[in-house]
């Protein structure tokens, strides 16, 4: 009998803990109500001002990952409240005074002769607040031109540029908002285009639970000057949500990211899909069950990541993107498409990162990051200078 009472007591304690966690999450959502309303108002206003109908999506280079940490964790939005300035490109809501006088550089060796890079500088101004300035460049290499008869006309290049101004503000100890304004220019031989886009983000951070959540409306905008007259293309809009939590007693942080939240269907079942099975007798396409289609479509919206932090100087990242896996897998062999990994080294004021994201066998771009906090470096230099003077003083 005492054993049964003890087991019953353990079950009650577990039920109480679960109920407390559920109530705590409800409290978080309730407190986020005001900031979510503000976020939706701002987003709706930007959509009304900037969005235009037209052809297909343009400026898809805006979806490139300009952060090794983001690349290693699946290539989409991640929500982390720390000193990593490379994440400000995609999440301006965490831009605050911590990043004052910080410089971040990125270089990615993409496919073929394509490379892209970015440079970001963050500064806190007394009246303007927390701002970040970034320049992104994508070079697709040199091409040989020819006229309609096949006669060569010389070589030309194709390049994309984006200049971003980011702003962030902390509303309270747990809530913050931010926005990016992007000026976009593309030059392909004799054709060029200019456009504007904006990101709007809202974040929640609970320091006690080490829990971080971000909601992001990305690339709201359109072309202003088009490649061809009268055909206005849309920017690659996306609605994303991400959460992460650093576990209390083990050096792990898990990440869950959701993308393409504005649409449900992300898969395609038809005759053009090489993975569709065909009935040998009727020669008709055999469609997967509705349950299989539902779960495949559901997990295409998810990216699962894990970050291992054995010390404050080193971390390792690993992630799986189901949508990339489904889009890039091949029939003849198994593939690691959709998997990504990387690491970061933090030495005092300097941060170095490396990441790879697998698309197909032999197709995994290399991404490099370098970040430096100039204020912290100046303080460190001053401390060393002071200690040296103290040692020299008799």
Image: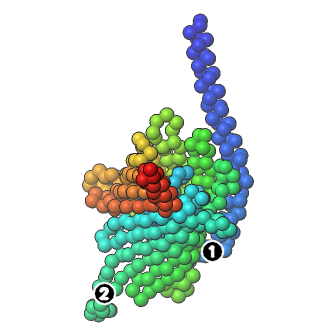
Q: Residue 135: image x %, image y %?
A: 48, 72
Residue 227 placed where, x, y %?
48, 84
- The image quadrant of residue 183 is bottom right
Tell me the number on the disc at residue 50: 1
Q: Residue beneath label 2, please? A: 155
Above or below, 247 against 351 in this view is above
Tell me: residue 209, above or below residue 71: above
Residue farthest to the top, as pictured: 1
Residue positioned 65% across, 49% down in the render: 174
- C-alpha span from label 2 to label 1: 36 Å
Residue 299 visible to an observer of this rendering? no
Q: Dot 1: within a 10 Å radius of its alpha carbon, few (fewer than 14), some, or many (20 or more) residues?
A: some
Above or below: residue 296 compared with residue 124: above
At mark 2, the secondary structure is strand
Q: Position of residue 85 (x, y in %)?
A: 50, 59
Q: Position of residue 170 (x, y in %)?
A: 66, 56
**Quarter containing the N terminus:** top right
The answer, for residue 108, to whether it is visible in the render is: yes
């Amino acid at each position: 009998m005492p054993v049964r009472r003890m087991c019953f007591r353990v079950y009650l304690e577990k039920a109480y803990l679960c109920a407390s966690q559920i109530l705590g999450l409800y409290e978080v959502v309730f407190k986020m109500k005001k900031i979510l309303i503000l976020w939706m108002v701002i987003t709706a206003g930007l959509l009304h001002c900037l969005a235009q109908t037209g052809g297909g999506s343009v400026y898809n280079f805006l979806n490139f990952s300009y952060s090794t940490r983001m690349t290693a964790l699946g290539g989409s939005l991640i929500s982390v409240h720390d000193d990593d300035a490379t994440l400000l490109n995609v999440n301006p809501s965490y831009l605050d005074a911590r990043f004052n006088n910080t410089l971040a550089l990125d270089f990615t060796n993409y496919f073929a002769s394509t490379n892209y890079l970015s440079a970001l500088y963050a500064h806190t101004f007394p009246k303007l607040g927390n701002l970040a300035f970034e320049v992104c460049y994508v070079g697709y290499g040199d091409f040989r031109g020819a006229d309609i008869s096949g006669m060569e006309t010389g070589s030309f290049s194709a390049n994309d540029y984006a200049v971003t101004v980011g702003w962030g503000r902390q509303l309270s100890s747990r809530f913050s908002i931010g926005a990016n304004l992007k000026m976009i220019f593309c030059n392909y031989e004799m054709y060029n285009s200019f456009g504007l886009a904006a990101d709007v983000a809202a974040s929640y951070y609970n320091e006690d639970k080490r829990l971080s959540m971000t909601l992001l409306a990305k690339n709201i905008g359109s072309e202003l000057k088009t490649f061809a007259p009268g055909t206005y293309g849309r920017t690659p809009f996306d609605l994303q949500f991400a959460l992460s939590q650093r576990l209390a007693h083990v050096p792990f942080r898990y990440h869950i990211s959701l993308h393409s939240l504005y649409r449900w269907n992300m898969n395609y079942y038809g005759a053009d899909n090489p993975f569709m099975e065909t009935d040998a007798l009727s020669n008709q396409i055999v469609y997967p069950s509705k349950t299989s289609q539902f779960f495949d479509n559901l997990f295409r919206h998810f990216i699962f990541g894990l970050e291992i932090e054995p010390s404050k100087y080193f971390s390792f990242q690993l992630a799986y993107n189901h949508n990339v896996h489904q889009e890039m897998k091949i029939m003849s062999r198994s593939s690691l498409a959709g998997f990504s990994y990387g690491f970061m080294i933090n030495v005092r004021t300097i941060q170095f990162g490396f990441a790879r994201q697998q698309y197909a066998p032999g197709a995994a771009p290399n991404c490099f990051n370098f970040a430096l906090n100039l204020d912290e470096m100046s303080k460190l230099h001053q401390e060393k200078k002071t200690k040296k003077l103290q040692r020299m003083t008799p």
